[in-house]
């Protein structure tokens, strides 16, 4: 932006007139504050805000009302009692033939370079209470490897197994971007080449006043912004031009995982194979819920579509419904492991319906047009987020695949001492899985000793078995590397 461009007039043309209150303090700002505000305003998705809330009252064609602002966008919660279990490939349906066929199909696609992986790591990790990006949290039960290392190692294991280079895309957010880039740069990309690693930042959305729909300012020179949710991935990736590059390279599928779950198998060939065999555009891996009110999203069939209903939106009596054998009717828990077709994501990037905003009522301090600071005591604002799982109902063909939680899901959400999903429960799950693999290879393990297997040493149970030709006994904590 040149000096001449940075004028109030330019900014007024960039910012719709109904939001010109954002410029109330322009005359009092210094050069760098003006630049900052200009940058922020040029990034605001004003069209998305207008779609969400209508035009502001008082503006030309204004439709927004107080009631309008407060209404909920999430229609699924009202329909929750109509939810049915999803059609899914259950564990019991995995015949040896299906497993072999799907694994082969998935392996072929990976070996042919048709798969890339994305790791979402833009969240603020508030519950864990760690002051760095969550990916930098040490989780390896013996090695102390970080969450980022666990995922990268798993992907490098897949590259070795399938003899191919697989691109890793890491989505960061405003608070995790700088430290994440520095972390990878200082550690030689954890072994990935510059061509294999792409770090990109998700977008933000402004917090708006719940009563008026006006954008809140956190200071006289900056807007109150927050990350636009993991569903921001489509918009953010599109902005980098990655979709076009992926198409040119022949990449057809994007394997999606969250940074906080180190049990996920990078580019799981079985999941990718099933996705391809049925011609799915969006596939999701689920686990059987441990109990009715477990805090995971519920994968259901609603209005003929696979959808996810957040646990907070599912009435308890609906969650508690059982089948005649006593098992849960709505059994499928979301673990946020997905496979998406690239051309499907391309379609969704142009569709506002595919990734609607979800509203969260939050308490957000702000500065008003007169420069007065307000510190509200109760929720006064609406923050908008997109959820990646909203892509499922947008797909013309989707697929749900059950997996065992003990093999695929051990998230790090909460701080040590909490009831669930802590670093300790995650480490225990990693140790349990690797102990099972070693036992299946005939290895004797002393009670209580922790084991951890590096994916480049053995990527799966079969590779562990191949490592042990003779009997072995493990008597102390061991990292197989
Ligand atoms: P969570 O919803 O669990 O949030 O994100 P979080 O940031 O990890 O933790 P809390 O809620 O603040 O305690 C699930 C996954 O989605 C990513 C997170 O990094 C995590 O991998 N995420 C979440 C994003 O990438 N962007 C977002 O805007 C939100």
Image (spheres, rainbow, N blue to C red):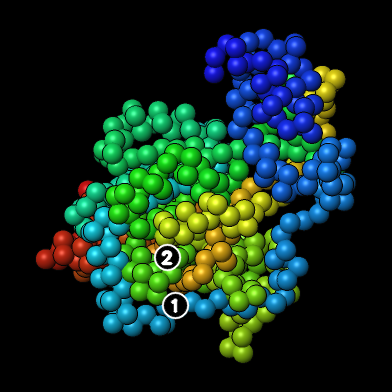
- In the displayed structure image, the side of residue 130 where residue 474 appears, left or right: left
**Residue 373, x across and y down, in percent:** 81, 23
> Callout 2: few (<14), some (14-19), or many (20+) C-alpha neighbours within 10 Å?
few
Name above or below for residue 24 compared with residue 205: above
Picture disc at residue 207: none
Taking the spot 62% from the left edge, 90% from the top edge, the residue there is 324
- Per the image, label 2 sits on a secondary structure element best described as helix
Name above or below for residue 221 compared with residue 19: above
- Per the image, label 1 sits on a secondary structure element best described as strand
**Residue 194, x across and y down, in percent:** 29, 35
**Residue 53, x across and y down, in percent:** 77, 47
Q: Are marks 1 and 2 in contact (CB under 8 Å)?
A: no
- Cα separation, mark 1 vs mark 2, equals 18 Å
The mark lying in front, picked from 1 and 2, is: 1
The answer, for residue 142, to whether it is visible in the render is no
Residue for badge 1: 89
Residue for badge 2: 406
Taking the spot 53% from the left edge, 51% from the top edge, the residue there is 349
What residue occupies the far left of the structure in this picture?
A: 469
Of pointers 1 and 2, the one earlier in the residue sequence: 1
């Amino acid at each position: 932006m040149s000096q001449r461009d940075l004028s109030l007039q330019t900014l007024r043309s960039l910012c719709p007139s109904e939001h010109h209150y954002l410029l109330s303090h322009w005359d009092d700002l210094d050069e760098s504050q003006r630049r900052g505000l200009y940058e922020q305003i040029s990034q605001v998705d004003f069209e998305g805000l207008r779609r969400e809330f209508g035009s502001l009252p008082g503006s030309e064609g204004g439709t927004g009302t107080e009631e309008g602002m407060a209404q909920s966008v999430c229609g699924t919660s009202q329909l929750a009692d109509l939810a049915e279990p999803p059609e899914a490939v259950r564990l019991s349906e995995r015949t040896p033939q299906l497993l072999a066929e799907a694994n082969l199909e998935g392996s072929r696609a990976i070996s042919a370079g048709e798969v890339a992986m994305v790791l979402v790591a833009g969240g603020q990790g508030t519950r864990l209470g760690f002051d760095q990006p969550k990916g930098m949290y040490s989780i390896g039960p013996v090695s102390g490897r970080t969450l980022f290392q666990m995922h990268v190692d798993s992907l490098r294991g897949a590259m070795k197994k399938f003899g191919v280079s697989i691109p890793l895309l890491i989505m960061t957010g405003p608070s995790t971007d700088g430290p994440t880039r520095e972390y990878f740069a200082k550690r030689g990309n954890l072994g990935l080449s510059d061509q294999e690693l792409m770090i990109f930042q998700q977008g933000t959305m402004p917090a708006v006043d719940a009563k008026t729909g006006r954008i809140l300012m956190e200071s006289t020179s900056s807007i109150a912004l927050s990350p636009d949710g993991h569903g921001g991935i489509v918009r953010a990736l599109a902005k980098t031009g990655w979709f076009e590059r992926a198409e040119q390279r022949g990449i057809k599928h994007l394997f999606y995982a969250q940074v906080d779950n180190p049990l996920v198998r990078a580019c799981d060939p079985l999941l990718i194979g099933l996705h391809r065999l049925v011609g799915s555009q969006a596939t999701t891996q689920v686990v059987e819920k441990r109990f009715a009110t477990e805090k995971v999203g519920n994968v259901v069939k609603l209005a003929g579509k696979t959808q996810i209903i957040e646990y907070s939106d599912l009435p308890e009596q609906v969650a508690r419904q059982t089948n005649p054998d006593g098992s849960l009717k709505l059994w499928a828990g979301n673990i946020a492991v997905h496979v998406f077709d690239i051309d499907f994501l391309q379609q969704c990037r142009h569709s506002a319906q595919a990734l609607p905003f979800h509203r969260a009522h939050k308490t957000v301090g702000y500065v008003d047009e007169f420069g007065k600071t307000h510190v509200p005591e109760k929720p006064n604002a609406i923050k908008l987020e997109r959820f990646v799982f909203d892509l499922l109902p947008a797909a013309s063909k989707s697929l749900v695949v059950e997996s065992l939680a003990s093999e695929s899901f051990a998230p790090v959400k909460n701080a040590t001492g909490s009831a669930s999903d802590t670093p300790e429960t995650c480490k225990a799950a990693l140790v349990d899985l690797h102990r099972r693999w070693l036992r299946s290879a005939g290895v004797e393990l002393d009670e209580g000793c922790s084991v951890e297997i590096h994916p480049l040493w053995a990527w799966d149970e079969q590779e562990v078995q191949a490592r042990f030709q003779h009997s072995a006994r493990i008597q102390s904590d061991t990292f197989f590397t």
